[in-house]
Amino acid sequence: MVSEARLGFVLKDLRVDCSKTHTLNVDEYPFALENREELETVESMNLSPGW
């Protein structure tokens, strides 16, 4: 389990595409976030790729 304060950092380290339409380079970001709307209130998400 990851705290909300670290979530953006963890998603960045795992190279997860957090953009709404998953438009980041798939070679660089092989994973895509599916539940983006559930994380809209998490402040650290602004550090995640594509947010």
Image (cartoon, helix red, strand yellow):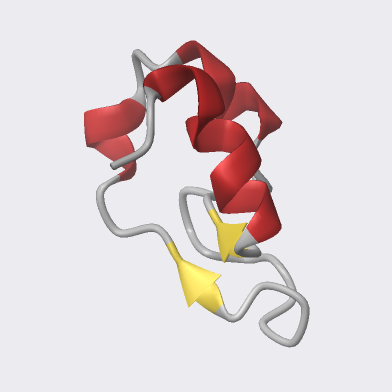
Up/down of 40 relative to 9, above or below = above
50 vs 5: above or below: below
For image coordinates 57% across by 60% down, the residue present is 17
Which residue occupies the extreme bottom position in the image? 27
Task: Give the number of callouts.
Answer: 0
Image check: 32 left or right of 16?
left
- Please state, as top left, top right, bottom left or bottom right, where the N terminus lies in the image: top left
Relative to 39, does residue 18 appear above or below in the rendering?
below
Q: In which quarter of the image is residue 37?
A: top left
Residue 18: x, y in percent?
52, 50
Residue 9 spot, x, y in % from top left: 64, 38
Quick one: 9 or 20, which is closer to the camera?
Answer: 9
Does the image show residue 51?
A: no
Rendered residue at 34%/13% (across/down): 41
- Residue 13 placed where, x, y %? 68, 55
Residue 26 seen in this snapshot? yes
Q: Where is residue 45 in the image (x, y as percent from the top left)?
A: 53, 28
Residue for point 53% across, 28% down: 6
Task: Give the image quarter of residue 42.
Answer: top left
Vertical position of residue 17 compared to residue 2: above or below: below
* Residue drawn at (74%, 87%) of the image: 27
- Asked where in the image residue 38 lies, by quadrant, the reply is top left
